[in-house]
Amino acid sequence: MNIVDLLKWVPLVFVVLVVLLYLAVSWDSKRQDTPGPPPPPPRPYSDFGQPTTPPAAPTPPTAPTAPGTDSAQAGQFDPKDRSPNEDQFAAKTFDPKDLSPDADGFL
């Protein structure tokens, strides 16, 4: 048997495989349409906890301690811990002359 005789069977084998694949897919889809057992009924809300139990109160968050401070002053700001670059973000005092136009007429 040479290669030419084998190549004659390739289209037939391909068609048979496609038909078998189609039959398997259609059989599986029909099988999924059959109803199974009904889903379980939902549980009543009373099963989720006793109604006499009050919900737990949330705990307030704790502030992290600043470096160089003891635990008695937890959360207190120490100006010594400020880096020099933080001064650029410090609150500036308002000066009414800031609203006066300059020589170009801009505020």
Image: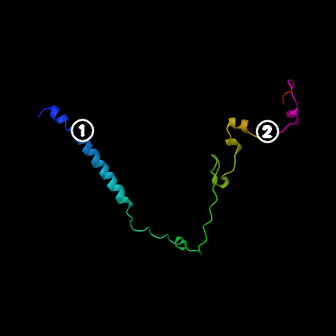
CA gap, disc 1 and disc 2: 85 Å
- Residue stretch in magenta: 92-104
Which residue is disc 2 drawn over?
92
Residue 23, how many percent across, how many down?
A: 30, 51
Q: What secondary structure do most residues of the magenta stretch adopt?
A: loop
Splitting the image into 4 quarters, where does residue 54 fall? bottom right
Q: How crowded is mark 1: few (under 14 residues within 10 Å), some or many (20 or more)?
A: few
Compared with 57, 91 (above or below) is above
Residue drawn where x is 85% and y is 33% of the image: 98
In the rendered view, tell whether residue 97 sits above or below residue 52: above
Q: Name the residue under label 1.
A: 11
Residue 88 lies in quadrant: top right
Q: Which residue is drawn at 39% across and 68% down?
A: 37
Residue 14 location, quadrant: top left
Residue sitting nearer the eye, 38 or 79: 38
| Identity of the residue drawn at 17% across and 36% down | 6
Up-down: is 105 above or below 7?
Answer: above
Q: Which of 79 and 24 lies nearest the eye of the viewer?
A: 24
Residue 12: where, in percent of width, then height? 22, 41
Q: How crowded is mark 2: few (under 14 residues within 10 Å), some or many (20 or more)?
A: few
Identify the amino acid type marked 2: Lys
Q: Name the element at disc 2.
A: loop
Q: Residue shown at 71%/43% (left/top)?
A: 79
Quadrant of the image containing the N terminus = top left
Q: Of residues 93 and 43, which is closer to you in this image?
A: 43
Residue 90 spot, x, y in % from top left: 74, 39
